[in-house]
Image (cartoon, rainbow, N blue to C red):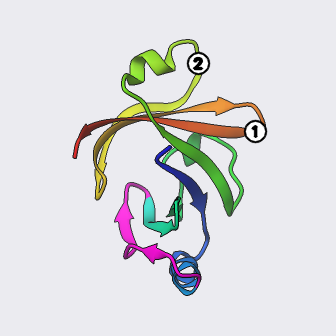
């Protein structure tokens, strides 16, 4: 597992909260269609977003849990048999370059599958 994605309305306030809780938090950056920051609290890795990259393809709350992000070796093979909600597409950021896609999962959640293309 790479991280858990969480949508927050106030990214700066959320970053401050996690810092007070003892987490390592990256400085927020503009990314894709919103802003993001990464949080490491012990073994837990969260990515905080102001807007999900797939926001236009799913009915999402204003805040809350978005999805777990899972590394895969072969994105096309992983997507076989799933109905893809969004993607696949290539994205880049402080994490390098990845090819990602999202699928709907039971329990009204989404899963992100991502294939690392470059560091």
Q: Residue at x 60, y 46 (%)?
A: 67
Residue 110 is covered by the magenta coloring:
no
Q: Quadrant of residue 37?
A: bottom left
On the image, the x and y values in percent for residue 109 come to 69, 40
- SS at mark 2 in the image: loop
On the image, the x and y values in percent for residue 4 come to 56, 53
Residue 31 is covered by the magenta coloring:
yes
Q: Compared to 42, does 75 lie above or below?
A: above
Pick out the residue farthest to the right.
107
- SS at mark 1 in the image: loop
Circles 1 and 2: CB distance less than 8 Å? no
Q: Which residue is mark 2?
A: 82
Q: Compared to 21, does 38 lie above or below?
A: above
Q: Residue at x 29, y 55 (%)?
A: 93
Q: Residue at x 31, y 53 (%)?
A: 95
Q: Which residue is mark 1?
A: 108
Within-10-Å neighbours for mark 1: few <14, some 14–19, many 20+: few
- Characterize the magenta stretch by its predominant secondary structure: loop
On residue 85, the disc is none
* Of residues 102 and 86, the one drawn nearer to the viewer in this rendering: 102
Within-10-Å neighbours for mark 2: few <14, some 14–19, many 20+: few
Q: Along the horizontal axis of the image, is 59 left or right of 74?
A: right
Range drawn in magenta: 21-33
């Amino acid at each position: 597992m790479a991280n858990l994605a969480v949508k927050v309305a106030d990214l700066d306030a959320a970053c401050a909260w996690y810092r007070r809780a003892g987490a390592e938090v990256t400085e927020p950056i503009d990314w894709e269609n919103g802003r993001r920051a990464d949080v490491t609290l012990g073994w837990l890795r969260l990515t905080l977003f102001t807007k999900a990259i797939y926001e236009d393809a799913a009915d999402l709350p204003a805040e809350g849990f978005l999805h777990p992000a899972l590394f895969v070796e072969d994105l096309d093979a992983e997507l076989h048999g799933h109905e893809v909600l969004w993607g696949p597409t290539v994205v880049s950021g402080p994490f390098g370059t990845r090819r990602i896609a999202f699928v709907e999962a039971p329990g009204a959640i989404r899963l992100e599958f991502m294939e690392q293309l470059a560091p």
